[in-house]
Image: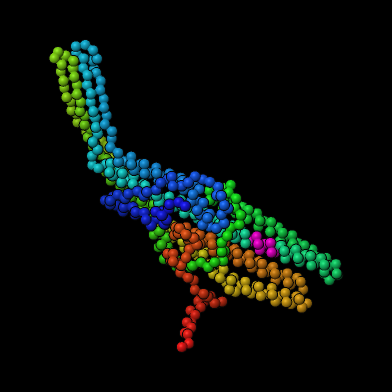
């Protein structure tokens, strides 16, 4: 497994400085070599955690983001390096009694802390790249989780369509037997034949979605040629609910997008400080030695001091540009926070709707549909209804099962998005996650049920 302890949710990253006066933050330790080379897994994965582990080791998006961090670190190192000295030597007259030889050394002395300010701005660029690496990690995990549960739902749909096909085929065979016995008409047999053909088409189409889902999941883990069979997870396990306001606050607090934007604000602030001191001239110091070959020889020492005079160019344009960058970065930070809050509200609405719908299917709709089939089977065995009535009851049950599975898919996809917004390292979410709580039970009128009465043991 990868060493992601410092990247799990951005919790251990240093918050970028709010103003240029703050102390510099040391960049995180992250070795790009920690990711092993891409390889086809030796065993076929089946669980979500196995797929996530492969994706974190294999996905090129993470490699690109890690390379971007290393690039930013290199820029931060380069920003603090002092200018190299310049050595020169020569002769204005090579030979003769008046020949001369000289050697000089020139060094630029950087003033006003320009290198320190430049490195501070570059370090904020490192922080931004590290937050973007966190974002890339959860982009990969979100893709894997979404494709995993989409495939899990497709597998369940395939099972239901297989059951529908079995029912339709059995009904067609029974209809043929009844028609030969003179108890059913040719029209009834044709109707059952159409139902069988429709069920077979739906079953074949569902198998196509399963195959496509496997290929999408293989691509999302970064190994598009990997073989994937059945995935294993509990599609019907209960999930917590989320309080919207608390969840919005937690998303803005934990998500790496606002933190990357805050790092950009800090970088622009340091860049402005660097632009302000740019007109303060550096000092170029020259020292040298010159020897004139004569009788007697003439030795000379030379010293020269050079300073650029900021008469016309006082870096006015760059100062205005960097100040505008601060305003832009602050506006982008606010826009990201608003977008996250809006996305969270929309996702929670879908999640709550799907949660309630699945609970109603489990507690009310599916039990009634199953009871209807049981009663219809009993009445059919007693000869009180026709086989067509039994077929209709079975179709309603299976259609209800399909709608239930669709609600499960909506629920899981919304849960994946909530985990993405919160940047949860583990999935599925739990009531202990920010904003999470256990959803109270409701009656058929949608009213919360009272808590169970505590049973007091008899003395």
| Extreme-top residue of the structure | 96
Q: Residue 159 colored magenta?
A: yes
Nearer to us in this view, 289 or 110: 289
Give x and y (percent) for residue 238: 53, 68
Question: Within the image, what quadrant is residue 246 found in?
Answer: bottom left
At 62% from the left and 59% from the top, the residue drawn is: 155
Using the rendered view, name the quadrant where residue 425 is placed.
Answer: bottom left
Left or right: where does residue 72 sit relative to residue 162?
A: left
Residue positioned most to the left = 296
Counting from the top left corner in percent of width and height, residue 161 is at 67, 62
Q: Is residue 320 visible?
A: no
What residue do we see at 51% from left, 78% from top?
449
Vertical relation: 36 (above or below) 445:
above
In percent of width and height, residue 146 lies at 54, 57
Secondary structure of the magenta portion, mostly?
A: helix
Q: Residue at x 18, y 25 (%)?
A: 302
**21 left or right of 376 in image:** left
- Residue 13: x and y, percent? 36, 54
């Amino acid at each position: 497994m990868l060493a992601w302890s410092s990247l799990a949710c951005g919790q251990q990253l240093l918050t970028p400085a709010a103003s240029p006066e703050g102390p510099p933050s040391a960049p995180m330790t992250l070795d790009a070599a920690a990711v092993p080379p891409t390889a086809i897994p030796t065993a076929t994965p089946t669980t979500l955690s196995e797929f996530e582990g492969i994706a974190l080791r294999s996905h090129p998006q993470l490699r690109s983001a890690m390379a971007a961090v290393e690039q930013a670190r290199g820029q931060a190192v380069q920003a603090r390096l002092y200018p190299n000295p310049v050595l020169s030597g020569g002769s204005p007259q090579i030979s003769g009694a008046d020949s001369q030889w000289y050697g000089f050394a020139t060094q630029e002395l950087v003033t006003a802390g320009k290198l320190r300010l430049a490195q501070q701005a570059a370090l904020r660029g490192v922080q931004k790249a590290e937050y973007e690496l966190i974002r890339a990690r959860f982009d990969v995990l979100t893709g894997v989780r979404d494709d995993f549960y989409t495939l899990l739902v497709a597998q369940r749909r395939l099972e239901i369509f297989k059951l529908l096909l079995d029912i339709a085929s059995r009904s067609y065979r029974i209809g043929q037997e009844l028609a030969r016995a003179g108890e059913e008409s040719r029209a009834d047999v044709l109707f059952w034949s159409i139902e069988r053909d429709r069920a077979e088409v739906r079953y074949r189409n569902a198998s196509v979605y399963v195959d496509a889902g496997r290929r999408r999941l293989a691509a999302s883990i970064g190994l598009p040629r990997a073989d994937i069979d059945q995935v294993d997870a509990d599609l019907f396990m209960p999930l917590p609910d989320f309080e919207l306001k608390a969840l919005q606050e937690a998303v803005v607090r934990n998500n790496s997008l606002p933190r990357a934007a805050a790092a950009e604000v800090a970088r622009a602030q340091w860049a402005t400080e660097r632009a302000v001191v740019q007109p303060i001239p550096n000092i170029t110091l020259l020292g040298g030695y010159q020897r004139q070959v004569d009788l007697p020889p003439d030795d000379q020492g030379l010293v020269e001091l050079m300073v650029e005079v900021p008469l016309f160019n006082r870096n006015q344009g760059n100062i205005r540009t960097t100040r505008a960058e601060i305003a832009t970065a602050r506006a982008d930070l606010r826009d990201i926070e608003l977008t996250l809050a809006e996305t969270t509200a929309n996702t929670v609405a879908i999640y709550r709707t799907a949660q309630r719908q699945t609970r109603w299917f489990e507690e009310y709709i599916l039990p009634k549909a199953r009871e209807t089939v049981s009663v219809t089977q009993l009445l059919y065995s007693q000869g009180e209804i026709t086989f067509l009535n039994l077929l209709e009851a079975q179709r309603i049950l299976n259609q209800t099962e399909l709608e239930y599975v669709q609600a499960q898919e909506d629920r899981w996809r919304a849960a994946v998005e909530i985990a993405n917004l919160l940047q949860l390292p583990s999935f599925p979410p739990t009531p202990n996650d920010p904003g999470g709580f256990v959803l109270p039970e409701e009656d058929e009128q949608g009213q919360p049920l009272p808590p169970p009465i505590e049973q007091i043991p008899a003395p």
